Amino acid sequence: MSKATVAIVGRPNVGKSTIFNRMVGERLAIVEDKPGVTRDRLYGQGEWLNRTFNVIDTGGIDIGEEPLIDQMRMQAEIAIEEADSIIFIVNGREGITPQDEEVAMILKRSKKPVVVGVNKVDNPDMQDLIYDFYEFGFGQPFPISGSHGIGIGDMLDEVFANFPVHLEDAEEESLIKIAVIGRPNVGKSSLVNAILGEERVITSNIAGTTRDAIDTNFTREGQDYKIVDTAGMRKRGKVYENTEKYSVLRAMRALERANVVLVVLDGEEGVIEQDKKIAGYAHESGRAVVIVVNKWDAVEKDDRTMKAYTENIRETFSYLSYAPIVFVSATKNQRIHKLLPVVNEVMDSHQMRMPTHVINDVIMDAVSRNPAPTAGGIKRLRINYATQVAIGPPTFVVFVNDPDLMHFSYRRYLENQLREAFSFVGTPLKIIARKKNES
């Protein structure tokens, strides 16, 4: 299920980054009492009432030399496009400014749900500061204090009441959703065109040609797919334009909506540092992963080239040891026919559910062959039983005498035993240790 997305919008120096930090529970945004300090668009996850949601700090859109009003307008417009609900932050101590009115006018035209947060209302004696902001016509303004955390919960209650029902939730379970990610100019758009068999996506050898994520539905051999071609992810220091900054956000949201992720590498250039970061996003997303080495036709090869390249990928992406590797040439249409069968295979693994008694047989056999080491030579991990509690990715709970005794190396050993027994391909596995009798 796709998470709802909230954008925090407002003129500079009203406390957007402080509110963002409060909502995501981390100090991710640089906060300083000067206008325009936030230079990077920040994207995080918040949680309220046991429901997680995405948060965008729009202060991160830097429009270079554009006038301030134009910058705010572009920030608001991008937030409107990306968000399901918008929090409009104003400064209660300063009242309504012409800049606030400009942002309010843009938000009003958007028809998106808007909640007004009147920031810097730090004590009950300042409650009267909110009344001027009824003038915007967005309903009740909420007095909040980002620096003290006051009123954030009441504001989020209203935000959640405005969340729309996502069309994504209603999609058929049989549909396989594929996200295509990678740094710029590795041939993602050409790969999408090759899979679709038609020129659906604009391609160019200029890095960053694709700015938007484009969803395309298609069917092959009775199986329905949705493929999303995302803009190339760039290093933070190399993202010059606000639209490219937000293309990274779109790529992250594409990961969230996907079942299977194609991590595209440039076979001609080889693996670089940015590839590791992008592959890390795919792994952390919990989605099934296929590594696609594109432009393989341009690589000078001998009988050991593919093996050496595979070994390099396995060493570089050790955390993606479960992901199959497919070597293709999108422009020459070489080996493209192998991709969808691999996608189907990893999707099956991602959705695989095994009977509890079979899981316990595998786990207990693994323990008998290789018991867990004692902690400090005194106490040993004892596994009572295990069960699978979720799919997408397959998630297992192992009930033990003491979860703190479950060392990461032994968890990895159990994971490898499960992979070997059930042939999990292309999907991460989660193993959660819980104390016996704990629900």
Image (cartoon, grey):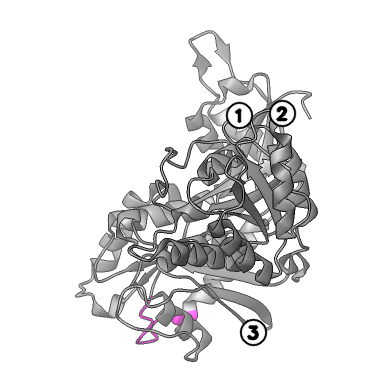
**Can see residue 359?**
no
Q: Which residue lies under the disc numbered 1?
A: 148
Q: Residue at x 66, y 71 (%)?
A: 109
Badge 1 crowding class, 10 Å Cα cut-off, few under 14, some 14 to 19, many 20 or more, is: some
Rounded to the nearest angstrom, the CA distance separating label 3 from label 2 is 67 Å
19 and 107: which one is in front? 107
* Percent position of residue 381, x then y: 60, 20
- Who's the residue at 56% across and 75% down the image? 227
Name the amino acid type tagged 2.
Asp
- Which residue does the image show at 47% across and 91% down from the upper left? 199
Looking at the rendering, the stretch of residues picked out in magenta corresponds to 328-337
Tag nearer the camera, 2 or 1: 2
317 on left or right of 174: left
What quarter of the picture does the C terminus occupy?
A: top right
- Left or right, 118 with respect to 170, comes to left
At label 1, the amino acid type is His
In the figure, is residue 396 to the left or right of 36? right
The alpha-carbon separation of the residues under discs 2 and 1 comes to 15 Å
Circle 1: element type:
loop
- In the picture of the structure, the residue carrying the numbered disc 2 is 125
The quadrant holding residue 216 is bottom right
Q: From this viewpoint, is residue 221 visible?
A: yes
- Read off the residue under disc 3: 221
Q: Position of residue 316 (x, y in %)?
A: 32, 51
